[in-house]
């Protein structure tokens, strides 16, 4: 009998606390904080926290503070689905952001779409994410788009024609390679060989030996800083001197630390221009370094951008109706740390691709790809 | 020439596998424990190496710390974790070991950060072409260190009283004890040697990759198990052959089968194929 009484108190208590919490506006955030993707997770979370801090300092959402509801998804789809359900049902969030990789983001996107809760992918690039439906958006480039930009960069800007492709065998690397290969011929590129590696590989001795024998003009290699750092280091010390072209996965000071002197001259396509004069980018770079003591990276900038899109939409919508929030996100016109953000009908971002190069141990401006026909994401 | 180079790359990878897997096979041979947390000690070797080198600049000192520090920690893990549950069914220490491994990975992340640590002035990165083979200094050193350490172990086990006591205990613990061999000392020795080898391997891989990450033990944690199964559980000779063979198969597989299977898949296909022909593994006995 006693137990029953206590149990009956639980809904009442939770309602009480529910009201107590209602003073904040909750934004869901799934991010890998443990496991193999914890490094990117930490950056994404810091970027998001900075955006929330800045928004709260400038009045929050119509006077209410924003609360980031954070769950560790270990970059794993099987963690992401229960987290999405929990964010929607238990925490009652009306909008959420993924600071995670493609696998978990894709899995969670289905749940948010079914519940009609807007969900933004900060830096996961798999095409399937936004195809989940109209509540799903992405503030970073799709893999295909960035792969196409890589083809333009190598074939047209750099005039390199014999290319070896080294592909990270996951959603990220595969969609980059698909975009690159689709456009390669249009820029006169001949792909003389393609090698694949898994995300756990750090030893590339046999690939280096084979690439040396292939004698390419350039190497298009996908990866994250923790795979690309060892890869570039081993390519250079293995006597392969041709340009290496990477993507936003390299975009971290960690890449330069790992690859050391070998990182000089490496060129990437990404969404953050560190030499930008835009006040939004400059203030993000200074504030982030002040907050964390780390240098900025693409993932942090993407987390920051996605949260800023949410904040702007919440302020504009002025309500907690998910439909209104979704419509406000869809109409976004925002200059963020990663450039000007607006969405197409599918919820994909439209913006220019930044090309960065390592010079004197730091990332710098190389060029910008503005060809909106080439960069156009799919509309459906 | 390319084939020869791929073969050498395979031996290089294989000798790293060997350093890790020998410790695991020693523990299995003596105690019948699948010591998954061994891979956590390997990671610790990487951290000891990079931390000591970055603060002292001495490769020798960091090597000594990685080897002996990890060796001693291996003994402590045996003392605190396994000793109390030795009389339990084998799955109990296995589960304890998996739990310990996960805890170690997360502890490294909390202590040393999720981004991993790199060498400030990475040593042994210069190319040193010998006989037309393009390997870095660090890679030649790896091959050399593996030969010295494993050769030393072979000498130790066949030419010293300690080695004799160890082999006797593996073959028949009760008989060995009745001849006055202290089984506890043999176990300590066993864990020390195995862990020291893993620590050395961790430091070497940290230098070759110029990156020590909390999760760098995740691949060795299961691949080393595959290797000791392949070598015929508990056989040191078998483990060595299996490790080198696996390295070579992976090296060629990455290039010629890489678009179909990744490196890990190639390794396990190889394991399955060998076990179909020789279910007992490549070798039996010590």
Image (spheres, coloured by chain):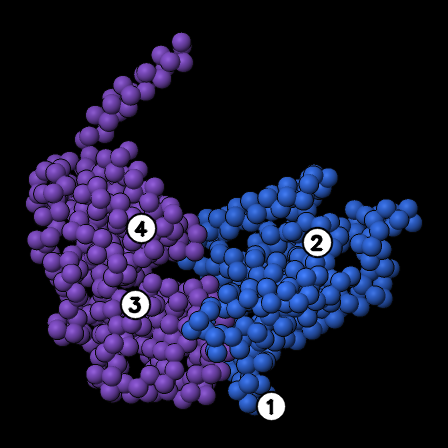
Chain colours: A purple, B blue
- The lab-note entry on whether marks 2 and 1 share a chain reads yes
Q: Which residue is under mark 2?
A: B28
Whole-Å distance between the Cαs marked 3 and 1?
A: 40 Å
> Where does the image place residue A267, in percent across and percent down from the top left?
30, 76
Instruction: Judge left or right: residue B230 versus residue A369.
Output: right
Circles 3 and 1 on the same subunit: no
SS of the residue under disc 4: helix
Q: Which residue is mark 4?
A: A107
Q: Residue at x 46, y 69 (%)?
A: B261
Q: Which residue is mark 1?
A: B131
Q: Nearer the viewer, mark 2 or mark 1?
A: 2
* Residue sitting farthest toward the right: B179
Residue A325 x, y percent position in the rendering: 12, 44
N-terminal-most mark, 4 or 3: 4
Q: Badge 4 sits on which subunit? A: A
Identity of the residue drawn at 80% across and 65% down:
B156
Instruction: List x then y, in percent, for residue A230.
Output: 45, 71
Of B275 and B232, which appears nearest the observer? B275
Residue A301 visible in the current orientation:
no
Nearest to viewer (mark 3 / mark 2): 3
Q: Is B114 on the left or on the right of A353, as rendered?
A: right
Residue B116 in sight: yes
Q: Is residue A169 above or below residue B28?
A: below
Q: Quadrant of residue B246?
A: bottom right
Q: CA distance from mark 2 to mark 4?
A: 40 Å
Q: Comparing marks 3 and 1, which lies closer to the viewer? A: 3
The relative height of residue A4 versus residue A31 in the rendered view (above or below) is above
Chain under disc 1: B
């Amino acid at each position: 009998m006693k137990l029953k009484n206590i149990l009956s108190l639980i809904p009442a208590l939770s309602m009480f606390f529910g009201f107590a919490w209602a003073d904040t506006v909750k934004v869901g955030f799934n991010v890998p904080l443990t496991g193999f993707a914890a490094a990117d997770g930490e950056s994404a979370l810091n970027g998001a926290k900075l955006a929330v801090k800045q928004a709260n300092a400038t009045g929050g959402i119509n006077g209410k503070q924003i609360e980031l509801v954070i769950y560790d998804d270990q970059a794993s789809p099987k963690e992401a689905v229960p987290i999405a359900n929990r964010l929607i049902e238990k925490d009652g969030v009306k909008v959420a952001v993924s600071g995670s990789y493609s696998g978990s983001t894709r899995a969670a996107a289905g749940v948010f779409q079914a519940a009609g809760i807007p969900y933004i992918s900060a830096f996961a690039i798999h095409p399937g994410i936004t195809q989940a439906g109209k509540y799903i958006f992405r503030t970073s480039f799709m893999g295909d788009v960035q792969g196409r930009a890589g083809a333009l960069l190598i074939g047209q800007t750099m005039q390199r024609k014999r290319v070896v492709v080294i592909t990270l065998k996951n959603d990220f690397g595969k969609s980059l390679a698909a975009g690159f290969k689709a456009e390669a011929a249009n820029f006169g590129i001949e792909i003389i060989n393609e090698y694949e590696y898994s995300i756990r590989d750090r030893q590339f001795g046999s690939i280096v030996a084979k690439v040396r024998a292939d004698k390419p003009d350039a190497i298009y290699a996908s990866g994250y800083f923790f795979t690309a750092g060892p890869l570039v280091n081993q390519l250079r010390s293995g006597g392969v001197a041709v340009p290496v072209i990477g993507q936003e996965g390299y975009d971290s000071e960690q890449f330069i630390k790992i690859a050391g002197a070998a990182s000089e001259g490496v060129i990437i396509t990404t969404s953050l221009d560190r030499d930008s004069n835009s006040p939004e980018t400059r203030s993000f770079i200074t504030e982030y370094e002040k907050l964390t003591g780390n240098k900025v990276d693409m993932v942090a900038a993407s987390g920051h951008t996605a949260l800023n899109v949410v904040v702007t939409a919440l302020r504009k919508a002025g309500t907690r109706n998910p439909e209104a929030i979704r419509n406000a996100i869809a109409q976004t016109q925002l200059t963020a740390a990663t450039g000007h953000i607006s969405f197409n009908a599918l919820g994909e971002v439209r913006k220019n691709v930044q090309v960065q190069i390592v010079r004197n141990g730091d990332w710098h401006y190389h060029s910008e790809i503005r060809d909106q026909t080439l960069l156009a994401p799919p509309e459906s | 020439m390319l084939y020869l180079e791929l073969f050498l790359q395979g031996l290089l990878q294989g000798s790293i596998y060997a350093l890790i897997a020998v410790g695991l096979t020693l523990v299995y041979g003596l105690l019948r424990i699948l010591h998954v947390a061994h891979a956590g000690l390997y990671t610790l070797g990487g951290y000891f190496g990079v931390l000591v080198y970055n603060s002292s600049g001495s490769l020798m000192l960091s090597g000594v710390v990685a080897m002996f520090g990890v060796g001693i920690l291996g003994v402590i893990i045996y003392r605190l974790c396994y000793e109390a549950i030795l009389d339990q069914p084998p799955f109990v220490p296995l589960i304890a070991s998996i739990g310990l491994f996960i805890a170690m990975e997360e502890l490294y992340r909390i202590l040393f950060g999720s981004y991993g640590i790199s060498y400030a002035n990475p040593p042994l990165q210069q190319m040193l072409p010998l006989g037309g083979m393009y390997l870095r200094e660090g890679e030649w050193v790896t091959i050399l260190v593996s030969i010295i350490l494993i050769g030393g172990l072979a000498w130790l086990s066949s030419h010293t009283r300690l080695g004799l006591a160890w082999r006797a205990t593996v073959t028949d613990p009760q008989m060995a004890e009745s001849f006055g061999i202290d089984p506890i000392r043999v176990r300590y020795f066993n864990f020390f040697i195995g862990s020291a080898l893993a620590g050395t391997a961790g430091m070497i891989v940290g230098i070759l990759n110029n990156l020590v990450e909390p999760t760098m033990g995740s691949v060795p944690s299961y691949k080393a198990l595959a290797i000791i199964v392949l070598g015929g559980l508990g056989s040191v000779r078998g483990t060595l052959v299996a490790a080198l063979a696996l390295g070579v198969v992976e090296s060629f597989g990455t290039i010629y089968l890489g678009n179909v299977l990744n490196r890990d898949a190639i390794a396990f296909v190889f394991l399955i194929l060998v076990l179909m022909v020789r279910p007992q593994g490549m070798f039996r006995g010590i």
